Amino acid sequence: MGIGIACTVIGLWTGHLVWILSMVEVDFGSIWTYVHIIVQAYLYTGLFITAHDSMHGSISKNRKINKVIGQIALWLFAAFRYRPMFTKHMAHHRNPGTESDPDFCSRSQNPIRWFFHFFFSYVTVIQILTMALLFNTGMYLIGISVAHLITFWVIPAFLGTFQLFFFGTFFPHRLPHTSTMEPHRARTQQKNHVWAMMSCWFFGYHWEHHEHPRLPWWQLYSTKQ
């Protein structure tokens, strides 16, 4: 079931992106442009969470299948490499909310400063060059307009990244750390499964994720009593 759900998320992201880049006009006077941006941003979030589940071995019992699906999802998200992402994420789980946590910003709790700390800790020069190559390939070889690429590819990617950051890093791990957050230094959303799914694919149930790291995103709701 995990493989099917992962492939469905990847397929929805791919299908919607192809559709809006080829069939939908960029018209900021139309509400549908904004709807497509929001939907694609949400699918970007799901794409990364699919990769995240692969790092925890939650998609398949086969480690190679987990890695392949995770690498596909990460590359589609923003040309990330699986191994460095896996290494950093495991460091996050070993030391959440501390200076040894690569996702935690000990210098500032300001969400904007923390976001840029989070963003630039993962972005590499090779990744930027790869994304630039893809952008220019889409524009010059495929003939996709700059307006379409920025509106439906670049903007949703940044919105999805911020959604992941806010609900998966800033909200659960920000200071102050209270006794109810131990031993993971992570807080959780209140029980509202609809909002939890809409806000970040149940990833706001973050204490539960740290307590049950091998549980896939679509089963996290079951941990809420």
Image (cartoon, rainbow, N blue to C red):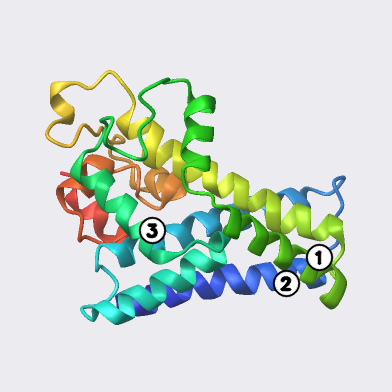
Label 3 crowd (10 A; few <14 / some 14-19 / many >=20):
few
Q: Is residue 127 above or below residue 103?
A: below
- Residue shown at 48% from the left, 64% from the top: 74
**Mark 1 and mark 3: Cα distance apart in space:** 36 Å
Q: Which residue is mark 1?
A: 24
Label 1 crowd (10 A; few <14 / some 14-19 / many >=20):
some
Query: Could you tell whether 70 is left or right of 99 in the image?
Result: right
- Sequence order check: which comes first, mark 1 or mark 2? 2
Label 2 crowd (10 A; few <14 / some 14-19 / many >=20):
few
Q: Quadrant of residue 176?
A: top left
Q: Secondary structure at mark 1?
A: loop
Q: Which disc number belongs to residue 207?
A: none
Query: Could you tell whether 156 is left or right of 103 in the image?
Result: right
Q: Nearer the viewer, residue 52 or 205?
A: 52
- Sequence order check: which comes first, mark 3 or mark 2? 2
- Residue shown at 75% from the left, 63% from the top: 135
User: Which image quarter holds the N terminus?
Assistant: bottom left
Q: Is residue 143 visible?
A: no
Q: Is residue 122 above or below residue 79?
A: above
Q: Secondary structure at mark 3?
A: helix
Q: Secondary structure at mark 2?
A: helix
Residue 123, given in percent of the width and then of the height, sits at 53, 49
User: Which image quarter holds the C terminus?
Assistant: top left
Q: Which residue is mark 2?
A: 19
- Amino acid type, mark 3: Pro
* Residues at marks 1 and 2 touching, judged by CB atoms closer than 8 Å: yes
Q: Is residue 59 visible?
A: yes
Q: Nearer the viewer, residue 6 or 122?
A: 122
- Amino acid type, mark 2: Trp
Residue 206, given in percent of the width and then of the height, sits at 28, 42
Q: Which residue is mark 3?
A: 84
